[in-house]
């Protein structure tokens, strides 16, 4: 009996929304070679606030646990949120973000791939035949101020990041393996999900500080791997005339 396709898309993500993912050359080559998207296990990310709960929600979970109303303590809930979910991160918007060039790629020798909401959804529909997949815009909060958070599943805490990261304008693809991994006790550091590159990628953007030689190399390897999308230089490469 075929499995029910499970994919959830954030209603706040507008039709036609353009998304960017900043990559160094090694990760770009890996994408072309493997023809797959790599999702990182959440606890392998550097942000210690990933999966964090506010003080009030921690107290609510702890109280329910002490009364035998739930099987998870607050610490167990956070651990499962971090250890059983896998994330691939994008930035919302078509324009360059210099902070993200420097942080996730390089302003002189990296690339950014662009996609759209619709392209991500189509890929997720293929993945969701085997996985539970969600796409959502991150909400930025100050965890210390006890803002409203609706927490019902192990992926819900991943919808929130601290306001210190607001500049990322992040959109996330999240694959949950909580049911599978609880049984198998196997938690790889990352998972790969196949994509049809021409359908998934809208364009390739070469870093603003890159020389013409790098633009030519990126154009060449893109063709060699049969990715038929536009390759262009960042608009920040040029001064207005």
Image: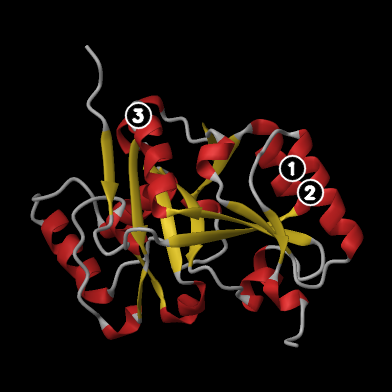
Q: Which residue lies at the image location 56% right of the left edge and 73% below the top edge?
A: 95
State the residue position of label 1. Answer: 222
Instruction: Name the spot of residue 67 as percent of width and height, x first.
Output: 8, 55
Instruction: Name the spot of residue 202 as percent of width and height, x first.
Output: 55, 50
Quarter holding residue 107: bottom right
> Outermost residue toward the front?
241
**Left or right of 58 on screen, residue 210:** right
Mark 2 residue element: helix
Mark 1 / mark 3, whichever is N-terminal:
3
Circles 2 and 1: CB atoms closer than 8 Å: yes
**Left or right of 23 on screen, residue 177:** left
Instruction: Name the spot of residue 156 as percent of width and height, x first.
Output: 28, 57
Mark 1 residue element: helix
Q: Decide which of 195, 230 is in the foreground and name it.
A: 230
Quarter holding residue 221: top right
State the residue position of label 3. Answer: 180
Real-space Cα separation, disc 3 to disc 2, in angstroms:
40 Å
Q: Which residue lies at the image location 15% right of the left edge and 66% below the top edge?
A: 60
> Outermost residue toward the bottom?
241
Real-space Cα separation, disc 1 to disc 3, in angstroms:
36 Å
Is residue 189 in view?
no
The disc placed on residue 219 is: 2
The disc placed on residue 238 is: none
Is residue 3 in view?
yes
> Outermost residue toward the right?
213
């Amino acid at each position: 009996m075929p499995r029910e396709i499970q994919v959830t898309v954030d209603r706040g993500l507008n039709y036609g929304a353009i998304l960017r993912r900043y990559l160094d050359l090694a990760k770009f080559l890996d994408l072309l070679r493997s023809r797959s998207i790599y999702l990182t296990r959440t606890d392998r990310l550097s942000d210690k606030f990933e999966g964090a709960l506010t003080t009030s929600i921690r107290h609510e979970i702890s109280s329910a646990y002490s009364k035998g109303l739930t099987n998870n303590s607050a610490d167990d809930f956070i651990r499962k949120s971090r250890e059983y979910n896998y994330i691939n991160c994008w930035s919302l918007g078509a324009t360059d973000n210099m902070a993200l060039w420097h942080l996730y790629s390089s302003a002189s020798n990296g690339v950014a791939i662009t996609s759209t909401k619709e392209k991500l959804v189509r890929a997720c529909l293929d993945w969701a035949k085997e996985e539970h997949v969600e796409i959502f815009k991150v909400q930025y909060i100050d965890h210390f101020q006890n803002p409203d958070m609706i927490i019902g599943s192990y992926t819900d805490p991943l919808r929130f990041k601290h306001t210190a990261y607001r500049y990322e304008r992040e959109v996330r693809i999240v694959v949950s393996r909580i049911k599978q991994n609880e049984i198998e006790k196997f938690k790889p550091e990352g998972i790969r999900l196949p994509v049809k590159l021409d359908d998934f990628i809208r364009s390739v953007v070469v870093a603003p500080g890159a020389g013409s030689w790098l633009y030519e190399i990126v154009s060449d390897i893109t063709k060699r791997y049969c990715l038929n999308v536009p390759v262009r230089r960042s608009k920040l490469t040029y001064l207005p005339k």
